[in-house]
Amino acid sequence: MNFLRGVMGAQSAGPQPSGAETIQKLCDRVASSTLLDDRRDAVRALKSLSKKYRLEVGIQAMPHLIHVLQTDRSDSEIIGYALDTLYNIISNDLEEEEQDDSEEENSQKQVEDLGSQFTEIFIKQHENVTLLLTYLEEFDFQVRWPGVKLLTALLKQQGPQVQQIILVSPMGVSRLMDLLADSREVIRNDGVLLLQQLTRSNAAIQKIVAFENAFERLLDIITEEGNSDGGIVVEDCLLLLQNLLKNNNSNQNFFKEGSYIQRMKPWFEVSDDNAGWSAQKVTNLHLMLQLVRVLVSPTNPPGATSSCQKAMFHCGLLQQLCTILMATGVPADILTETINTVSEVIRGCQINQDYFASVNAPSNPPRPAIVVLLMSMVNERQPFVLRCAVLYCFQCFLYKNQKGQGEIVSTLLPSTIDATGNSVSAGQLLCGGLFSTDSLSNWCAAVALAHALQENATLKEQLLRVQLATSIGNPPVSLLQQCTNILSQGDKIDRRGSKVQTRVGLLMLLCTWLSNCPIAVTHFLHNSANIPFLTGQIAENLGEEEQLVQGLCALLLGISIYYNDNSLENYKKEKLKQLIEKRIGKENFIEKLGFISKHEFYSRAAQKPQPSFSSPDHMMFDHEFTKLVKELEGVITKAVYKSSEEDKKEEEVKKSLEQHDNIVTHYKNVIRVQDQELEELKKQVESLKMQNEQFQTTITQQVSQIQQHKDQYNLLKVQLGATARKENQHHTSHSDVAQMNGVQPEDISKLRDEIEEWKHKLELLQEQLKEKDSLIETLKLPSVAGDTTEQSSQTNKPSGGREADNELYKEMETLRSKIQSQSSDINKLQTENQELLQKLSLTPVPVSGDGGTVVVSKTADLDGKLSTLLQETKELKNELASLSEEKASLKSQLDSSNSTVAILQNEKTKLQQELAESKKEQDDLLVLLADQDQKIIALKNKLKHLGEPVEDEDDTESGDQGEDDEEEDGEEEED
């Protein structure tokens, strides 16, 4: 400030220098001063002069200001002054505010050029933009806010160039996204404006911004600001969302998958008291509706549009829009935009169309929303844009909606008309508009009725049944006849608006009605006045306004020729073509037909489905009708130039094609039946596979149980062996104690008696031993025979059974060894008895009482040993019997499992044979189909050679696809 005071003081003391001189001194001071305070004061002075002397400051000070940004980064104050000065130089907003309304346009252009030139100088060095991006990371308000404003001004002046620099800068876009998270609202709001300029017409930056969580942050800001009741910040956020989503399929898909459509529902929650709609609220709601339309625009890919439409229905957004649609007190422009939005949300989506058909207006009695909207469309007192919006809504409701088309046409048929007249139907409103004296109502009703017949031959035939009562006492006439009567008397009826508009609407309705419907053509030709009227209109030389009517009359006459089934003798194809050649001329007819596609209104209507016209007089063509004209113009031209012989050949080819089509249909039905049979066989195979798996699991469980039994048996065997060893040890100890060197003499007689008894017992034991040996031999022979049979059937028997038999054989061997050991013990006892006898006979033994007791005890011990041996022998026999029973049960289980597996294998073999036979039958049928296809292709080629258009049928493609599917299924079954 001292420096500035010195400069100003010098100016007052002497002759005052010019602004350029002052700016030059300040620039010198910035460049040469070593003190930071002096440079800061000089930059502050340049900032104050930059508004008035924009050109001078920009030319002289810009390099110095850029140098300050590069060198004085540590001082936030001087950086803030430098950024503000650069903003004043580059931005045109300040100049626009100061300009008066009386200034000329060339001065404004000069100001814009000045800002653009300074911007070009600044961004010439890409490092300057990168440096500016680094300052946006500073949290200091004095630095960050001027930096945001300066970058926004640069984008306004040279948007594409600055966008490219930011795009290649590392983390350039990410730095800017941090502005949305700033707690200071000024910086956050200006950051939204900056991102608006940054994302304009740049898909790459739009994707980066979207994936930097921009949707989440912007929707949070809108919610914080109060949704539609918010201020201009909400408007800026909505504009930024439009930039990110419009014509960007990737971002639209990301928006839908992120469940952000659900967050749009609260925007449209309008209270019952709709009074006091502020201008900002109207603007916000208008932008919100446009954002919904961006997601479901007809220009988007069909798949993306359909998924967004379904999401809007499931989250309740469509229901909320319909609530606004039926609410009272809604401003006209919001109501119009809501109708357009609902139209595109339901267009081509069956579930949404069905819901819209169920919506009722809050009236007494309740009326369907469609009826209420049609009442507005045919009411000439309603605004023009509102009537166009209602027509668009009706068209979208009927688009690809045969169910809705049938409901509309059914309200015109005699069987469904309400005789009491208490309620007004959609059909009655359309007829009323079609025959009113307002030309705009005529056109809208005709186009709406044409959409109810679009691509639906059944409804075209049903509409021929509609009868109208023209006046009391006169017989009723058909709707088709009444349309042609009004068309022929168009000039005589006094109407409000353009008479050409009414005739164009009726001709579009008749062309749509008669196209691809020979029955309707026959009804049209049955009225003898129609053809003379058309030829008269086409042959006359009328003004430019009437040329459009002449072209449509030529189109209608061409449709009557092309779709004529020659059922009327006086109006066969050949006679109509002769009539054209005599009264009009073929060249003149084709020229008049070409008037339609060459018209300016035709080109406008062909651009987009929504009817948007600057004035009612421009409302001539419908978008769907332009598609019909494009489709029929060429075929009608060929039909007019065809000879009678070519027509006959064409008819023959068509008949043969129909016959072949019938044959193909028959074989397709046969194939369909076989496909069903194949599916049933597949199901049977699957069930058998499941049964097989169940059997396998059962066998596995049984094998595991057998293994458990084996383990238990081994454990018991070990325990028995241990007890046997203990008993043997006990018996040997007792025998050792019982041995004696002599007995008493008095007990010799008693001992002799006992010995005789022991001999007798020994004989008995020997007999028992022989019986045991014979029993062992008998057990041994079946086991050996079983082993031989097992070896012969080893390939058919599971491995688990062989292991079980081996275990049983081993156990039997152990039992034999035990019996042999016991027989050896008995032999020992026999030898002991023999020794005792020898001692008794050779040695005189004294008799005493103690010796008697010893002999008695020894005899008791021998009796105990014999009893234990007999008991053990019985137990061993019982064990052998139980083991043989277990072996027999295991064999029976294994045999039953093997028989089950064999049965399953036989069933599988039978199924494979049946599949092979069915495949062979299908191959024969496919050969027949291939022959028929060759014939059809030859006939189609003949038709093409004759000049007839031949359309490929989807049925033949589906047949080929079915054949491929059958072959694949056959291969899978063989595998």
Image (tube, rainbow, N blue to C red):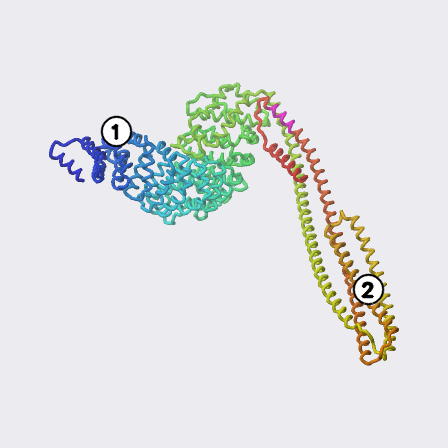
Q: Residues within 10 Å of mark 2 (few under 14, many from 20)?
A: some
Residue 207 on image: x %, y %: 42, 38
Residue 271 on image: x %, y %: 38, 49
Q: From mark 1 to mark 2, how far is it between C-alphas? A: 139 Å
Q: Which mark is residue 637?
A: none
Say what amino acid the circle numbered 1 marks: Ser
Say what amino acid the circle numbered 2 marks: Ser
Residue 589 on image: x %, y %: 50, 21
Residue 192 in view in this figure: yes
Q: Nearer the viewer, residue 361 or 427?
A: 361
Which residue is farthest bottom? 849
The mark that comes first in sequence, 1 or 2, is 1
Write down the residue under mark 2: 823
Q: Residue at x 79, y 48 (%)?
A: 792
Residue 282 in view in this figure: no
Write down the residue under mark 1: 107
Q: Which residues are magenta?
A: 933-943
Residue 148 on image: x %, y %: 31, 39
